[in-house]
Image (spheres, grey):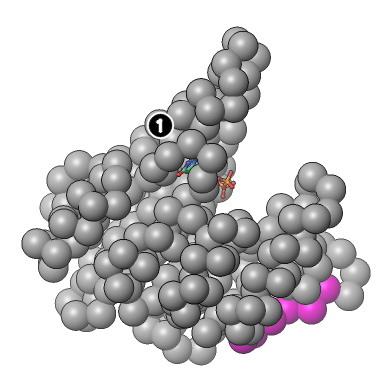
Amino acid sequence: MSRVVLSVGGSLINPGKVDVLFLQKLAKLVNALSKEFQFAVISGGGTPAREYASAVRALGGNEFVADEAAILMTRANAFIAASALGERAYPGVMEDFNRAAEAVAVAERRVVVMGGTIPGFTTDADAALLAEKIRARRLVNLSNIDAIYDRPPRRAGAKKFSRMTHSQLVKLANEYDMRKAGTHFVFDNIACKIIARSKMETHFVNGKDLKQVEAAIRGGKHDGTTVK
Ligand code: UTP
């Protein structure tokens, strides 16, 4: 069975409070497609991760500790995603790649769920690494941004990429990185480099639009961006 890693943005799971309806709909889709694909889900941190990290900083904690707090919140989101999947979820939230890969290997019909791993990373990079590790057929990034654009999407004249190569993506992520804070690229720099080195087919879609998500899972045409 083809393996597909779903990287679910924290802003979809918890934009301020847990979006139960979104998780139920996503779980329904994952369940329906589990006859054809084996899924692993990585959850982002969303608002709680940011809140906890800044609370740690306000209390005098350093960046490493702030990241540790944020990771706990990505895992809390993963736990909630697993709850939506019920029996379909492999028991427990995975905390490292080897354990996750082992679970993927032994339980083809279950969905392995994971949050963040080590400080200094993002769940984009975690998703890219897990996809690499388990030799996923493709990686699908679900976020509240519908595709990759050549400049911040709200800026005038922004052009959407329907398809792009890995090297185009790495170049664009780098350009964003050099700009001032506040221009947050869809997928972090390290994650872009990881999918590039493994030539991982990656799709960027609006995670709220489950028709788009399904098309991406199948490797078909959609309104987002396909990188390959
Ligand atoms: P996210 O991957 O959700 O970061 O991890 P993000 O870029 O803020 O994404 P959105 O806004 O949710 O889509 C949340 C935070 O958790 C820590 C980092 O502090 C990150 O900003 N984290 C996550 C790690 O330190 N290591 C990880 O492996 C994952």
Indicate whether 162 appears above or below 191. below
The image shows residue 108 at horizontal and vertical percentages of 13, 68
User: In the shown orientation, is residue 127 left or right of residue 135?
Assistant: right
For the N terminus, the quadrant is bottom left
Residue 166 visible somewhere in the drawing: yes
- 213 sits left or right of 83 in the view: right
Q: Residue drawn at (25%, 80%), measured in percent from left and top?
A: 2
The x and y percentages for residue 18 are: 45, 40
Q: Which residues are magenta?
A: 158-163
Judged from the image, the secondary structure of the residue bearing numbered disc 1 is helix
What amino acid is labelled 1 in the image?
Answer: Leu
Residue 133: quarter of image? bottom left
Residue at horizontal 36%, vertical 38%?
75
Instruction: Inspect the magenta stretch and tell me whether residue 91 lies in it.
Output: no
- Asked if the beta carbon under badge 1 is closer than 8 A to the nearest atom of ligand 1, the reply is no
Answer with left or right where residue 109 lies relative to residue 224.
left
Nearest the eye: 202 or 119:
119
From the image, tell me which residue sits under label 1.
72
Picture mark count:
1
| Position of residue 91 measured from the top left corner of the image (x, y, whole percent) | 15, 46
